[in-house]
Amino acid sequence: MKNIFENSNKLIDPFGRDVNYLRVSVTDRCDFRCTYCMAEDMQFLPKKDILSLEELETVCRVFMKLGTRKIRLTGGEPLVRKGIMQVIKNLGKEVGNSLDELTITTNGSQLETKAEDLYNAGVRRINVSLDHLDPLKFKEITRWGDLEKVKRGLHKAREVGLKIKINTVAISNFNQSHLPDILKWCGEEGFDMTIIEVMPMGDIGGDTRYGQYLPLSQVRQDLEKEFTLKDLPERTSGPARYVSVEETKNKLGFITPLTHNFCESCNRVRLTCTGILYMCLGQDDNADLKTVLRDKGAEALEDAIRSAIGRKPKGHDFEISRQSTNVSVNRHMSLTGG
Ligand code: SAM
Ligand code: SF4
C-alpha cells in the first residue's frame, strides 16, 4: 500500500523559493489578552471549526513528506491546548529525521510545568513573549498575565536546557524607553532577544494601530545610544535581521515587516487552527485544508498543498498610516500564529 507520509518532491513556489518551514497555530485560545493581539472579550471559535489534534498532526506529516524541515507551533497559546503535549512528543520523534527542528512560541505561562516535557520531546529552542519587566506594566499589556509566573517558567526552561529567545513587541508610549532594560536583562539571563514591529492584524477594540506603531528604525537608533550593535551576516529566510550586542554579549533581532520588505527570501507558510493555509502573513489568499482533509481524506492534501504553494505571492504590503483604516489584514495573529 502507498505510504501517504513517504517523502516526495519538495515544495518550490513560482518564485523558486523552497517552502520548507511551517508555522502552525494550534489554538486560537489564550490565557492572556495582550492589547495589541486580542480584544478583551474575544469570541473564540467552536470546537468543530478547529482541527482535532489528529488532524493537526496529519497535516504536519503531509508537509513533512513534502520537504518541510522546520515546524513552529504557536497560537493563541499553544501550551494551553489540551492534549498538545502528545502531538509535540509525536512530532518531536521526527527531529533529526524528517525534521531539523520543532520549536514553540509561547507566552511562558505554562513553562514551569511543561518545559521539561518539551525538552524531553525533542524541542531545543523556544520563543517566549515578554513586553515589560514591571509586573504592573506586564499586567497592563497582557491584561491577565502574571510576570513572576512567566519568570519562574523561563528559569525552569533554561535549567532543563532549552535555548530561549525573548520576543518583545515595540509599542509606542508603552515600552519604548524600557527596551534597553529588557535587552540588558536578556543579556544577564542568557537569553537572545527579538524586537517585533506591531502589525496591523485583526480588530483589537479600543486602541488604533497607529497609536501603537513604533518603527524599529527608531528603536535601533535609540538602542545605539547605549549599545554597540554589529550587523550579523546570518539570515533566516524570515523577517528578522540580527545584530550582536557588545555590552550584553547576546544576539538581538529586529522583525520589521512594515519598514522593510523581507519577502524575497520567504520560505514559510502558516496554518491556522481552523486548517486554513495562508501562503503569506500579509495577504488573504488561502487554501482550506480542513475541508479537503475532512471531505476527501489525507491523500488529497498533497495536491491541495501543492496547488496552494503554486499561488504563494511574491510579497505583501502592509500599511499603517494616519489615513489607513485600523486593520490591514482582517484576522487576528492568534488565528494565524505569530
Ligand atoms: N501566545 C504565544 C505568544 O504570545 O508568544 C504565541 C502566539 S502570539 C500571536 C505570537 C507572537 O505574535 C508574540 O510574540 C506576540 O507578541 C506577537 N504578536 C501578536 N499580535 C501581534 C501584532 N499585532 N503585531 C506584532 N506582533 C504580534
Ligand atoms: Fe495570547 Fe500570545 Fe496573543 Fe498575547 S500575543 S494574547 S499571549 S496569543
Image: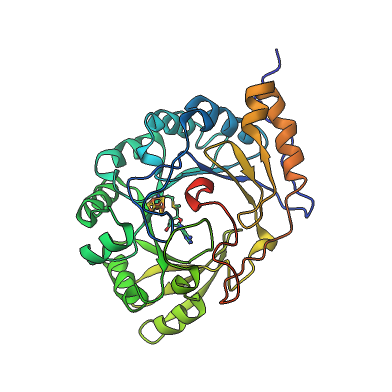
Whether residue 269 is visible to the viewer of this picture, yes or no, is: yes
Compared to residue 169, the image places residue 86 above or below, namely above
Q: How many marks?
A: 0
The image shows residue 114 at horizontal and vertical percentages of: 30, 39
**Relative to residue 60, is residue 141 drawn left or right?**
left
Q: Is residue 164 above or below residue 299?
A: below
Q: Position of residue 218 (x, y in %)?
A: 47, 81
Which residue ends up furthest to the right in the rendered image? 14
Q: Residue at x 35, y 38 (%)?
A: 80
Looking at the image, is 145 positioned above or below residue 305?
below
Q: Residue furthest top?
A: 1
User: 115 above or below 146?
Assistant: above
Q: Residue at x 30, y 66 (%)?
A: 132
Left or right of 255? Residue 142 is left
Percent position of residue 287, x then y:
68, 40
**Residue ID at (28%, 63%):** 140
Q: Position of residue 33 (x, y in %)?
A: 35, 53
**Quadrant of residue 239 within the rendered picture:** bottom right
Return the residue nearer the eye: 87 or 213: 213
- Rendered-image quadrant of the N terminus: top right
| Residue at image coords 74%, 36% | 9
Q: How is the image coloured?
A: rainbow
Residue 254 shown left or right of residue 138 in the figure: right
Does the image show residue 338? no
Which quadrant of the structure image shows residue 258?
bottom right
Which one is in front, 112 or 270? Answer: 270
